[in-house]
Amino acid sequence: MSEQTPFINRELSWLEFNRRVLMEAVDKDVPLLERLKFLAIFSSNLDEFFMIRVGGLKDQKLAGYTKVDISGMTPKQQLENISERAHELTTLRQEIFTQVKKDLDAEGIAIAPEVEPELDDITDAIFNEEIYPIISPVTLSPTNPMPFIYNFRLSVYVVLKKGKDLFHSIIILPDNLQRIFRVRLDKTYFIFAEDVLKKYLYLVFPDFEIIDSYCLRVTRNADLTLEEEGAEDLLGSIKKYLKTRRKGGICRLEVDGRLPADILEELASLMGFEKDDVYVIDDVIDMTSLFAVVGEKQELCYKPFTPAMPEGYSESADIFEYIKQNDVIMHRPYQDFSFVSKLVEKACNDSSVVAIKMTIYRANKNSTIMENLMKAARSGKHVSVVIELKARFDEERNVDWASMLEEAGCIVTYGIVGLKVHSKNLLIVRKEAGRIVRYSHISTGNFNEITANIYTDIDYITADEEVGKDSAALFNFLMGYTDIASWQHFYLSPKSIKGKLLELIDEEIKHAEKDEKAHIIIKVNSVMEKILLEKAIKASQAGVKIDFIVRGTCGLQPGIKGLTENITVRSIVGRFLEHSRIMYFHAGGRQRIFLTTADWMERNMDRRVELLFEVHKQHAKDFLWNILEENMKDNQKTWILNGVDYKKFKSGVNKFSHQKHQIDQI
Amino acid sequence: MKNGVFAAINIGASAFRMHISEYVNGKEHTLEYLIKPFRLGKDTFTKGYIALENVYLATEILRKFSQKLDEYKVKKNYKAVCTSGVREAVNRAFFIDYIRQETGIELEIVEPADEIYIKYVGVKNDIADFGRCEKEGVLIANISSGNVALAVLKDDQNIYSGALPYGSLRLRRIFSDIPRISRYKAYEQYVMKMCYSMENSMEKDIKLKHFVSAGSSLNILLSILKPIKNELKKSEIEDLYEIVKQMPRDSIMTKLNIRKEEASVLLPTLVTYLKLMEFVDTDVVRFTRQTFPHTLSLYYSGSIRDRGFAHRVRNTIYGMGKRFNMDEEHARNTVNFSMKLFEKLRPIHSMKRRERMMLEAAAIMCDVGYYIGSRDHNYHSYYLIQSIEIPGLEREFVKTVSYLALMHNGDVDSWFENKYSYFPLDRQLLLKKLVSILRIADAMDASHLNLITDFDVDILQGKIVIRAKCKKTPFLEKMAFDEKGKIFKDTFGIPIELDTRILYD
């Protein structure tokens, strides 16, 4: 990372974020199985990072692209730096896993143990019934070339001997093979399929001597750009895209450290990877599988809690009347997302409801919200859904949802060609006493009942007529009913969010220049958009105090004299994934607070439909201000960016954890 | 409008628009406004028809609008109208039928006179002190993509109205082959021709004071000039014109941050505004921000009314009569007599206000044919009336008035027995009722000497007697009454007599 520039490379900043996630696995205040979960999250994050970001950079490098990024690095330089950092992190993960595994063993949970003789009967059964019938070894020869190994597919490479001749065989573990088998004896064993397979290789190759066997796993490039020709073709393109994703080039090979160098070299030429792409793993390859273990013992997990319903709301209340009385603001997961599910359910079954409209970016499997929408459509209600087919990793599920919703009679549209619809909106149109009343739900989070328990997000629900008008116009725009729309309370990407933010920062600059108080707090997931960052630097130089609370990547080094000395950057990584996006501007004492779905990233500002919404109701402003204040006060889960490095800020006195405090408040 | 939701759709030459309103206790409140830019008029103005692929594209847009009608359950509570983009296409019937089949939306073509009238009513209800403007002289211009609809009002009279084919998109198409740097000159010449055409249709020396604008073109100017008040200054428009008059379209887009479609028609729009401001001799154009579909919604839902409509129509018709040198005194006598007869004979004719207005218009205009020649003047009156367009008066009304003028003289029976025997019976009856009264009223001043000053009507058992007070013995009137009154008996089944009493001799 260059110290000459105030900017930080996006990928390296992201790796720093993932390091913060990994470090949760060593935090003694985190319950043991949750620490294991952080290892799984770290691994899953890293998988995605390689597949998308490293894959993309590799494409750029191969294409001879030499343009430098915000921090002045070429793709080649970025890849070199990433490789160095990712190798360090992989080694660190290994060390942490070894410790966590040891600690869990002491608690009676054995992960990937040596397959001991007392387990023989069980492993026999696993091999004979689960593994053997579905594996297809390929022994390499001129007539049997190296098979194509799909992305993230675990394989076992076997070296065999017959007479004087050596043979090499590869067994790709099928997708439908159960990876982990839980065995409860005196302790609970989590036995991995590859370990069982390795034990019984003599049965797979009865005429051969097994010299050795090694696990390996490839990560392939999935950074493919979609051709967007038109809404009708979009569905087809996505399906085609999903097929091609499995066939990208290799950007990482995770392999057993015992694999001899000559075999590795041979594999490199057969499979097409480079030396830097090789990551040696001495224990479990693919730690995302550890998610299967994390629920094993409740006492080793975070203490469960029951989220609260919004203040003053009771099950027997009329939900619409309740919303009309005062705008509802909720903080997930401390407050119950089921309030939103209930609202949708009620709307779907309410004869006064004229129409229901919703954007879907990521919906969970078995979503009651989606089920209710389909039910409502089947019963003749006007239900419209704008579904984003390009939501990364949810494409397949969203294609399925789209088909099911259409089948049920919903009007399904796929947003605007060229732009991902990331804005999260729900609109319920109801006829009350002969009048149209619109209930608008604006959120920073997805309509996903599973992630609602893991991600922090803000839900804002209002029956305000003007906001309802904006919501209706937004849906008309997204559904192609209108090409020109104007909003009173909404600012939308790609056109107006950036402009509005620049205007708001400029206003702070003006106040600072008059020696008036000027303060900005930006709580988002990522900060990387150059124009905004440059404006932030300008603001800092003018004396505006800017506090960034950025969970993930941040492209700005704070505290550089003359440049960013009035800027602070902090990141909270804890039990819940910080996902709410709130922006505060002092605005000469008017204290303007906004909710948004947009990060300070080029993609959010220019290539997505995102929403920025100013909150006017005082109770809601106070609510959001309190969250920001607590974020700033946190001294247990906060990392402070200093130059290019994050340092954990863990105080021994006056301990305050924002997330814990929110739970305690319930 | 009773409480509920009403939707208005406008198929314009450059965009499709939909306005959804909710009416609660007489108050309108906009629920949604949709715009889909689509240059349907491009085909119409260049080829004369809407190409099939554009029919399909239009269908797709209207399918979405139809979903909106479903959403608000207003499939029976909407009005969808087409203006010049469809109106002037030779395959308009196919277009309308195809849209109906595919989307269920029933499109109607709005005639130019109706279009300008609806816009006029919108302006009148939206601009404060518009009444004063109408008195002092105002030009209302609706500058849209296809046409420029113009209405000139002064002293509560409609001096001029018409939809002329000078819309901005049309101009852009007409002069697309002219090199860009000199295209503005072509626009100027062409728009000046429009002003001449308007001027020639009006009385000389009419002085106007106000210029009020509406129409889709206005939005472009608003987005560029961003006026706070509802008015634009000539100097601002001139400055803008100087900047863009030779500028390439892409530069206009970038410089002014407007869409491609807007940049294409900006220049003809500016020329039209400037020339019309010159015509009125004003430095300010006032405008309404109300869109056409919004006005449509208000108008068809009955939320806005044309107060003073009857008064203005009456004045306008008198104004027209004067242009044809009518005998104003005779016209006023005929009007007075026919109106009094209408009121007195209410127990037998059961006609309403609209019919009364037809009768009044016919009474004013029936003799305008003398302007052409006294022989068969009723024929001349008939076609002169057929050619007039009065905003707000539907064609059917004007036609009826022309029939009444035709039949107010001569052998009325032969019209019903021959030429108009195909008319439905109810229409024949209406004409007979009205013409029966008109002929009597006209007969009562047959000499044009104003001899009958007043009268009373007695509906007796078996006959109706008109007891008239006269200045002198009205020989001609009596003779004419006998001849013209025959149809009265055939129509109402009761004879009518004229009993005259001389006040002095």
Image: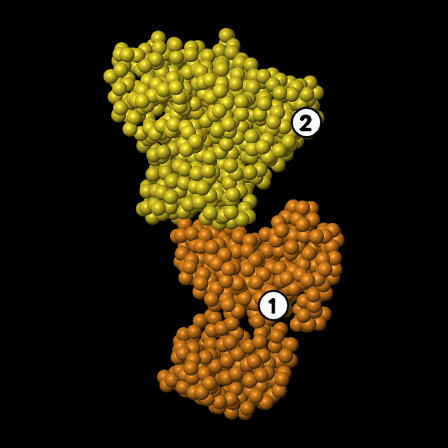
Chain colours: A yellow, B orange
Which residue does the image show at 26% across and 19% down from the upper left? A124
- Between A287 and B366, the one nearer to me in the picture: A287
Amino acid, disc 2: Lys
Q: Chain of mark 2?
A: A
Mark nearest the camera among 1 and 2 is 2
SS for callout 1: strand
Q: Amino acid at mark 1?
A: Gly
A27 to A72, vertically: above or below: above
Q: Contact, CB < 8 Å: mark 1 with mark 2?
A: no
Q: Residue A199 placed where, x, y %?
A: 32, 18
Crowd tier of the residue under label 2, counting other residues whose Cα lies within 10 Å: few below 14, some 14–19, many 20 or above: some
Instruction: Identify which residue is drawn at 70% across, 52% down.
Output: B248
Residue B490: horizontal and vertical position, in percent? 40, 86
Determine the chain carrying the residue at label 1: B
- Say above or below: B433 vs B185: below
Left or right of A516, for residue B414: left
- Give coordinates of residue B153: x percent, y percent: 63, 65
Label annotation for residue B162? 1
Numbered badge on residue A538: 2
In the image as oriented, which residue stretches furthest toward the front? A164
Residue A115, visible in the rendered structure: yes
Distance (Cα) linking label 1 and label 2: 58 Å
Q: Residue at x 70, y 20 (%)?
A: A562
Whether residue B303 is visible to the viewer of this picture, yes or no, is no
Q: Is residue A562 left or right of residue B87?
A: right
